[in-house]
Image (cartoon, helix red, strand yellow):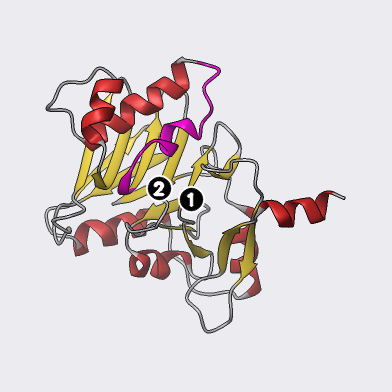
Amino acid sequence: MLGLFSSSVVSPPEELVAAGSRTPSPKTTAGKLLTRFVESKASAVSLQVGEHVQLAYTHHSESPWYPRSFAVKDEIFCLFEGALDNLGSLRQQYGLAKSANEVILVIEAYKALRDRAPYPANRVVCHLSGSFAFIVFDKSTSTVFVASDQAGKVPLYWGITADGYVAFADDADLLKGSCGKSLASFPQGCFYSTAVGGLRCYENPKNKITAVPAEEEEIWGATFKVEGSAVLAATEY
């Protein structure tokens, strides 16, 4: 799966910008990245959402345990990969039909965040049990919400293209060719929300997340890590 967002929707993370600046490497535009995805992935489907967002996915070569799915409801677009262990109980919690799958559940959970204020953003993902990664775009509010499971069982990566788009994908090699060193593995157990202004750990949303510059030989430009309470205490006094 692939999500591309212009800088008018998602501000490129400073850590990824800095990583790309330290070690300049070849990049391509978001348009070329999307074209490469569609041409290299069998039966790929791509979608332009407004002027600044592009989404794409395919069922080709997907894991039988972590299938990919896509849905749109009430101008909320969602790409989901993985499986939820507690889908049945979550259907009941959100009043959904037994036929509702994971991608519909995530849309409903996001709607609860958006419409039932105050509703902490971490509540959308902290009660999801399983292996997953998802990308949500709310066209009505121009909000992006991205998350990965606590164990990082479903891979997710993010980077910055040559024309400043922030790209999220489950294929590191795909992004490497377009994002150069402005590339990192999306941290497990975390979510990114333009509504809350950045990256958060959903179990401990107040804990600081830092980016550690990667070694020159690594394909990553940086590694994101959640600091513990002890580290936070040391920095606050």
Amino acid type of the residue tagged 2 in the rendering: Leu
Amino acid type of the residue tagged 1 in the rendering: Tyr
Percent position (x, y) of residue 135?
37, 42
Tell me the CA gap for discs 2 and 1.
6 Å
Asked whether the viewer can see residue 72, the reply is no
Query: Is the residue marked by circle 1 packed among few (<14), some (14-19), or many (20+) residues within 10 Å?
Result: many
Percent position (x, y) of residue 64?
13, 56
Horizontal arrangement in the rendering, residue 84 relative to residue 33 (left or right): left
Specify whether residue 122 is painted magenta: yes
Rendering quarter of residue 195: top right
Asked whether the viewer can see residue 189, the reply is yes
Which label is found at residue 4?
A: 2
* Figure check: 135 above or below 157: above
Q: Which residues are magenta?
A: 117-132
Horizontal arrangement in the rendering, residue 171 relative to residue 226 (left or right): left
Residue at point 17% right, 55% down? 65
Name the one closer to the observer, 203 or 165.
203
Residue at point 32% right, 63% down? 171
CB contact under 8 Å: marks 2 and 1: yes
* Figure check: 129 above or below 113: below
Percent position (x, y) of residue 14?
64, 54
Mark 2 / mark 1, whichever is N-terminal: 2
Q: Secondary structure at mark 2?
A: strand
Specify whether residue 108 is painted magenta: no
Percent position (x, y) of residue 82?
25, 49
Q: Secondary structure at mark 1?
A: loop
Name the one closer to the observer, 188 or 229.
229
The mark total stands at: 2
Query: Mark 1 — residue?
Result: 165
Residue at point 48% right, 50% down? 165
Rendering quarter of residue 188: bottom left
